[in-house]
Image: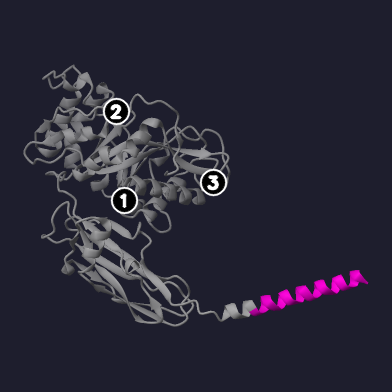
Amino acid sequence: MKKTNYILSLKSLLMSALVILCVTSCEDDKVDLGENYGFAYSQEAIAQKINMELEEEKTIDKSFNFVLRREAVEEVQVSYKYDETLIDVINKKANKNYKVFPKELYTLSKEEVSILPGKTLSDSVELNIKYGKGLEENVEYIIPLKATVLKGNISIPEKDSYLAFIVKVPLNSTKKSTDIKIFNCVEINRINPLNSLNFKLKNSDKYLFDAVILFSANMQYNDKTKKLHLSLNPKNKYLFDNADKYIKPLQDAGMKVVFGILPHHTAAGLANMTDAGCKQFAQEIKKFNDTYGLDGVFLDDEYGYKGTGDPSVLLPMADNKASSRLAYEIDKIMPDKWVTVYAYRDLIDMVAVEGKYPGEFVDYILPDYGITGDFSQNYYKLPKSRTGQFSMNFSNLASLKLPLPYLKELRDNGYGANMTYDVDPTEVSFKERTNSRWFGELPSQLEVLEFLTESLFDDELIFNETVYKSEWSHLEGDPEEWTGE
């Protein structure tokens, strides 16, 4: 009898709880969640900022939207207006001294956007930015567009009412007479990249090097996580962790700084990733690039393909379709950054991806040493002006005599790039001068650079002998997975 009463009491308790739950649930359905709110959004924004470089005779196109935190219950309309007072708000928040970008140098495809009931994302606004002669070099400007509500029960917090569109005209410190770009590939295990600042042209007062390649971060495949990741040895890590000291001065001088990616003795190469693997690794590359404020990547497909990996991540064999997909995914997620390629092994050519040709997702190709072919033909739609010729390996002085006679041919035939590897002002051979124009003798590194300057730019090279030594070459250890921390 007592047992029966207990069961009845338990049933009553459960029924009461069920009633309370139902009532509470029904009441929750009627709870006013308060005013919905939203924010200005662009896929390319990092912490509400979009950094852009604007060059002469070029334009920049950006798209952005307005996003609600939850679905609209009625149609919402938002306008974007030029608001010069934003500059004070942004400068105070960022502790900067941005200037206002001239209103006449940009256009919007529309000033009003809508969000339909049941949706969170508005239609897109297209922003077109053009160059103007009054813009100052190396000065950061803000396009002050502020969102305001025209219709709908929503609010926009002040801090979310704008995107900081930051526009900078790069310092015109490397644009030389023929506009041929010189890439200085630096072996960062032992050479300080700041040495790139030591070479200028006498007549034009421009830097010899347009871009610096930090060679190199490593790419590895993790058998346990079945993921691709970047890794750094202690030397590399020291340099990147001190980017303000060793990288930013190069950028402040107007040079692009891109980081090399080199496979490191695992099953992964740059040409055997599945589509899913390419997308995942492109995300990793973007995270690395953004963390250190770099200007893009340099893909070099050496030392990979050791073993096998998960077939959902890695293909059993290298294929130029895979390397093309990787370059495409990097360009897609970092459209404002350079995708440069060392045309070697399975990167010697690329194919179209999703209707885009290689010349549309690769910015520059730089061939292997001693190669004289026209690689623009291997990258359809890539013009000669973005194709390198006669790359030079400065760690092998004997090899430098081969491309020297052809440098003038590079210029005359319309090619737009050249790469130097392992220029090292700390080497004794750098200062040794034979004054012989190398008839039967080896040139010094400095003599080769002087000849390059004369051949490509009709100018004289000035070398600043204040050599920057490496402060990390003594560090030891194997590459470790980079986590961004």
Task: Give the answer, above or below, for where 485 lies relative to 354.
Answer: above
Question: Given the current orientation, which residue lies at the most extreme right position?
Answer: 1
Task: Give the answer, above or below, for where 54 lies relative to 223.
Answer: below
Badge 3 density bin: few <14, some 14–19, many ≥20, Cα 10 Å: some
Name the spot of residue 309 as percent of width and height, x first.
56, 40
**Amino acid type, mark 2:** Glu
Comes first in the chain, label 1 or label 3: 3
Name the spot of residue 190 as percent of width and height, x first.
31, 27
Q: CA distance from mark 1 to mark 2?
A: 28 Å
Badge 2 density bin: few <14, some 14–19, many ≥20, Cα 10 Å: few
Question: Residue under circle 3?
Answer: 313
Question: Residue under circle 1?
Answer: 337
**Can you tell which of label 3 and label 2 is closer to the viewer?**
2
Is residue 432 visible to the viewer in this orientation of the structure?
yes
- Looking at the rendering, which quadrant does residue 439 occupy? top left
Question: Given the current orientation, which residue lies at the most extreme left position?
Answer: 203
Question: Residue under circle 2?
Answer: 471
Asked if labels 3 and 1 touch by Cβ distance under 8 angstroms, the answer is no
Badge 1 density bin: few <14, some 14–19, many ≥20, Cα 10 Å: many
